Image: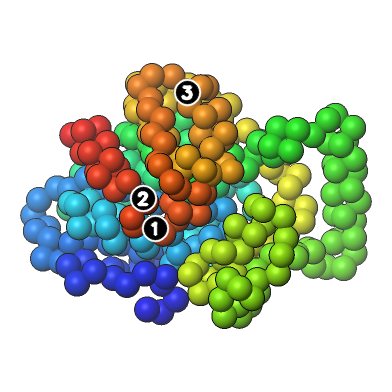
Amino acid sequence: MAGYIAELSAGVEREHVRYNNRYGIAIAADIYRAKGLDETRKYPALIVGAPYGGVKEQGPCVYANELAQRGFVVLTFDQVFMGESGGEPRNISSPELFAESFSAAVDYLGVKLPYVDRERIGVIGICGSGGFALSAASADPRIRAVATTSMYDITGFRTMFNMPPEAIAAQKKELAEKRWADFERGQQEIHPNFPEIPYASEADLPEKDPVANEWDRFYAVKRGHHVNARFGFTMTSKLAMMQFSCLQYIQEISPRPILFIAGDRAHSRSFSEKAYAMAAEPKELYIVEDAEHIDLYDRTDRIPFEKLESFFKENLK
C-alpha cells in the first residue's frame, strides 16, 4: 500500500501530482477518481485536508477512496513543510500557509484538470484542517461548500486550555527566548510525539492522559502510523498560531454552506459547536452517534459518507 493506511478500491484509480502554491512551494498531492471516468464530461471535485500533523496517506485516503466511488474527483495533499511537499526548514507550522494550501488545490483543479467543473469545488477539513479549510473558504469564494469532521481550531488553543493572560505572556516569553536558542544552534527545536516505528498493538502503548492516549491509538500503532506524520512541529511554530485566528471571518463564508460533523463522544466536539455558533446560515451541525474523535479519521462504519455525499451533491449543483 506504499504507506497508505487503507486499500484502494478496485473501482478507483489514484495518480500522484505536484504543483506549486502561490509562494512557489511545491505541493505533493494525489488525485482520486473512478476508473473509466469519461473525461469529456465535467465532475464536481473535493479537496480533503489531513489532520494537523497528518499526511495524505492517512485519513484523507480513506475519504478520497470512498467519495471517488460516489461521483467526485478528489484531491488529497501534504501540507507545506510536511510529508512529500516542499518547504524548508521542515516541520514548520504556518496557519496562513496551511489555509493557502486549500486555495492552491483549487488553482490546480480548476486549471489542470479539464474534466473538473471549476464552479463545483468543495473542501473537507479533518481535525486541524477543519480550521484551515474554514479560513481558506472565508477568503476564497471559489470554494463553494465546506465540511469539517472532528474539527480542531489549532489557532484557538488559548481558549482550548483556558489560558489566563499571565500564562499567555509566559508562553510568549518562553518561545521568544527559544528563537534565540534556535538561531544560535542553526536548527529549530522539534520533539516528535509519535515513534518512528509503530507499537505492535494498543496494549503496548505507554499510559498518558486521556487525549494523548487517544492520539496514540491512531498515530502510534499500525492503524494510522506513518513515518511522515510523527507530529513533530517546530516548537516556535506556536507563536504563529497565537497571532492568527482561523475563525475570525467565518461569517463571510455565507451564503455558501458549512457542514460540521463531530462524534458524540469526541473530546473535540466543542470546537465544532463553537464554530457552528459563530458561522452564518446556511450551516448544519451533524453529530455522529457512538464516535470518538479519531473514529472520524478512518472508521468507515462511523464516517457519515452518505451525509457528505448528499451535502456536496446538493450544494455543488
Q: Please state the horizontal and vertical placement of residue 174, each as a whole percent of the image.
A: 89, 48
Question: Mark 3 — residue?
Answer: 279
Tell me: residue 198, above or below residue 316: below
Write down the residue under mark 2: 303
- Which quadrant is the N terminus positioned in? bottom left
Tell whether label 2 touches label 3 (CB within 8 Å): no
At x 32%, y 46%, the residue is: 304
Q: Please tell me which residue is depicted at 21% across the width and 66% down the height of the picture.
A: 12
Q: How is the image coloured?
A: rainbow
Residue 278 image point, x, y percent: 52, 22
Three-letter code, disc 2: Ile
Res 82 quadrant in image: bottom right
Percent across and percent down for residue 285 are: 41, 30
Distance from disc 2 to disc 1, alpha carbons, whole Å, reads: 6 Å
- Asked if residue 65 shows in the view, the reply is yes
Q: Disc 2 vs disc 1: Cβ atoms closer than 8 Å?
A: yes
Label 1 SS: loop
Task: Indicate the secondary structure of the residue bearing disc 3.
Answer: loop
Is 23 left, or right, of 288 in this rendering?
Answer: right
Local SS, label 2: loop
How many neighbours does mark 1 have within 10 angstroms: few (below 14), some (14-19), or many (20 or more)?
Answer: some
Q: Nearer the viewer, residue 214 or 102?
A: 214
The residue singled out by tag 1 in the image is 299
N-term mark: 3 or 2:
3
Residue nearest the viewer, comparing 301 with 82:
301
